[in-house]
Image (spheres, rainbow, N blue to C red):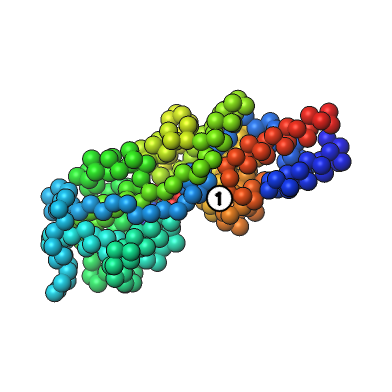
Amino acid sequence: ATPAATMVGTTIGAQNGVLFKGGDILERAKDVDTVVFDKTGTLTKGEMELTDVVVFDGDGQPITDGGDTAADGGQLTARDRLSEDDVLRLAATAEIGSEHPLARAIVDGARERGIDVTDPDNFENVPGHGIKATIGDSEVLVGNRKLLRDNGIDPSPAQSTMERLENEGKTAMLVAYEDELVGVVADADTIKESAKDAVRQLQERGVDVMMITGDNERTARAVAEQVGIAPENVRAEVLPEDKSDAVEAIQDEGRKAMMVGDGVNDAPALAVAYVGTAIGSGTDVAIEAADVTLMRDDPLDVVKAIRISDATLAKIK
Ligand code: ADP
Ligand code: MG
């Protein structure tokens, strides 16, 4: 393209909230044949809310009627029959120091229920898996199945509860206390209004649409289904450091991929993609690594970016 055409395209982009980092990017975008969306914060609003608390007894059976609070008087032990509020207080206390949206939702949800959330004595993030905290002499774990397994706790008694919540598109997290599974808490996110339209419009152009997430397979597929992404196009349980490898693997099939993401986790994947596109409300690290920044939070602007590239280059050829 001539410098003048590039300038026109870049200007039209900017007027539409689509910032191309250079003329070569503007030229490239039209050739994208695969769009890989990050799930949380990109297809979904990333505004998690606590939706469920399930208590398990010592035998790993869910308790549906919620027991009496065992906490008043003396230290809570895993052998006490815990109430929903007990489980939620343990989870929230463990998560209070975490910035993760899943953690924020647990803490906010607990406070909304009038639960007093205090600081743990210690906590440690386990990226992609959860959190490990100490309260007094006791260890609390909140996270996925792998987190529990890695700490010698069998998550399988909670399997049917986990599956039920995950099939609803929720992120279900196991809560363990003193080496016992004591409950499950779940957070749900809201899909962005235009996500489904964006996916459809891309597919109508002949672009393959994929989704990548650290979330579990079942939750990921439930969300994918709601936005119209095929189950075989979902890459789930991808660890933060493996997201860029996943994008490279997709490109090794000869595809020209646009990765769309918002998080720090997404930055390496944005950098290796043929076109990296950051959501403007996302983290600076993502914007830095990206080739295109979408100033609005609207997934339809992904289609717009490709259209602007198309239109600009068609005109000047
Ligand atoms: P995402 O790609 O959705 O941001 P992450 O890679 O951060 O996901 O986390 C993957 C999974 O690890 C989550 O779905 C959750 O099960 C678990 N997890 C991560 N951080 C936490 C946390 N602070 N508390 C509980 N679970 C967590
Ligand atoms: Mg994200």
In this rendering, would 121 be left or right of 258? left
Instruction: Reply above or below: 39 against 115.
Output: above
Who's the residue at 60% across and 40% down the image? 300
Residue 280 at x, y = what percent?
Answer: 61, 52
Is 150 in front, or is 296? Answer: 296
Residue 58 at x, y = what percent?
Answer: 13, 54
> For the C terminus, which image quadrant?
top right
Instruction: Reply above or below: 315 against 45.
Output: above
Is 306 in front, or is 191? Answer: 191
In this rendering, would 40 be left or right of 80? right
Who's the residue at 54% across and 54% down the image? 264
Q: Is mark 1 within 8 Å of ligand 2?
A: yes
Who's the residue at 37% across and 41% down the image? 169
Q: Dividing the picture into quarters, in which one does residue 124 lie?
A: bottom left
In this rendering, would 123 be left or right of 45? left
Tag 1: amino acid: Asp
Query: Badge 1: few (under 14), some or many (20 or more) residues near its Cα, within 10 Å?
Result: many
Residue 167 at x, y = what percent?
Answer: 33, 38
- Can residue 305 be seen here? The reply is yes
- Can residue 129 be seen here? The reply is no
Which residue is under mark 1? 262
Instruction: State how many labels appear.
Output: 1
Residue situated furthest bottom in the rendering: 73
> For the N terminus, which image quadrant?
top right
